[in-house]
Amino acid sequence: MSKKIFTSLGLMSGTSMDGVDLSIIQSDGINEFELILNEYCEFDEDLFLKLLELRDKLYTSKDLAKNFKNIIEVERNFTLFISKLVNSLVKKKSITLDLIGFHGQTILHLPKEKISKQLGDGNLLSQLTKTKVVNQFRQNDLDHGGQGAPLTPIFHFLISGILKTKFNLDFPMNIINIGGITNVSQIKINTYEKENLFAYDIAPGNCLIDEWIRKNSNKKFDFNGDIASRGEVNNLILNQTIDNFNIKDFKNSLDVKNFDISFTRGLNLEDGCATITKYTAYLISEGLKKIDEINKLNTVNLYLCGGGRKNNTLIENINEYLNNKKINLKNIDEYEFDGDFIESQAFAYLAIRSYLGLPISYPNTTRTLKPISGGIIEKNY
């Protein structure tokens, strides 16, 4: 008996909060995969500012209670915006969806307290789209001793099988996502034994650079790393900052609020951006050095996805820090995957796995006690 192929839409809005990625895939939730489409939609300015303002108010669980009414209001506006996008896309493309994987917008992540708050009303989205919605992907992992992140490694695992079959690439494979936070998925061999899939957050990605640009210009990010390329790194500040902060291990998930940009206070736009970019590159390179194969004789290929792969200055800085290692940093785009939409595709895939009760996180990816599924299925129509 053949397995059911689901048509699933994944929605992902990252730490930049500038818009949402939408991907529609067809998959059995295991090894069958076909991409139907990818689209990006920018948030309107009012929603962007409300999301940013709300996130900046939240640092503790008490802040969630204190800002409860504001959270409900912004969540509703966010969900209404998403529902209009989904309905418009489905109508335009004449597609019937089985599932929607609705990650939501992260506004607070406190794994030690088993809290990870994503804005997004799955019940309302189901009502407005007349489709089953899977959301709140992280809570079950947190409840079982996990960090709630990263969740994309099981999709990276699927990608590794495709890269092997279609392009004859060798294992082990290392997929590096440079989003707001940088995380690594290591796939030793493409089998479902838990020993073959490892993942961890290793460093900030775009989050510090984006914050600096937002606070010091009328832009939202450093396009291609152009602003950093015009600046001069303040090595005194950089070295002091490196000495004062380093990630000692990679057992814990990271959040944008684990880092700050106060060390660049007083620098101009370009120099501050250059210094933050160099600092980010240093932390990423230190994390990458933890990959076992990098310290051996053979050349290691690292496949890059996420918006940070387009920041030429950041990638150049990473290469400089790793110049004594045998590595190749390769864009996953070279292998027919659009690196901008890996996470939205992942949550379309995770929605299917969640619906089927299949694991989405593992002890070696999130530190959960055992392989477990996750997500809450909403049907309100």
Image (tube, grey):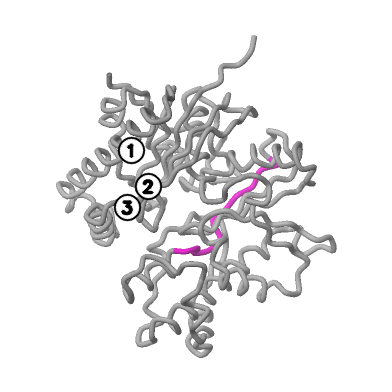
Disc 2 to disc 1, how far (Cα)?
8 Å
> Which one is earlier in the sequence, the residue at label 2 or at label 1?
2
The kind of residue on which mark 1 rests is Leu
Q: Which residue is mark 2?
A: 41
Discs 3/1, front: 1
Relative horizontal placement of residue 64, taking residue 191 as reference (left or right): left
The kind of residue on which mark 3 rests is Ile
Circle 1 SS class: helix
User: Residue at the top extreme?
Assistant: 1
Relative horizontal placement of residue 96, taking residue 80 as reference (left or right): right
Q: Which residue is mark 3?
A: 107
Q: Is residue 252 above or below residue 345?
A: below
The kind of residue on which mark 2 rests is Cys
CB-based contact (under 8 Å), mark 2 and mark 1: yes
Q: In the rendered image, which quarter is residue 84 located in? A: top left
Write the start and end of the magenta stretch as one range: 195-206
Q: Residue at x 58, y 45 (%)?
A: 365
Q: Main secondary structure of the magenta part?
A: strand
**Badge 2, how many Cα within 10 Å: few under 14, some, many 20+?**
few
Q: Which residue is mark 1?
A: 85
Q: Position of residue 247 (x, y in %)?
A: 54, 67
How many numbered circles does the render carry? 3
Decide which of 245, 341 is in the foreground and name it: 341
Q: In the rendered image, which quarter is residue 35 located in? A: top right
> Which one is earlier in the sequence, the residue at label 3 or at label 1?
1
> Which one is earlier in the sequence, the residue at label 2 or at label 3?
2
Q: Position of residue 6 (x, y in %)?
A: 51, 22
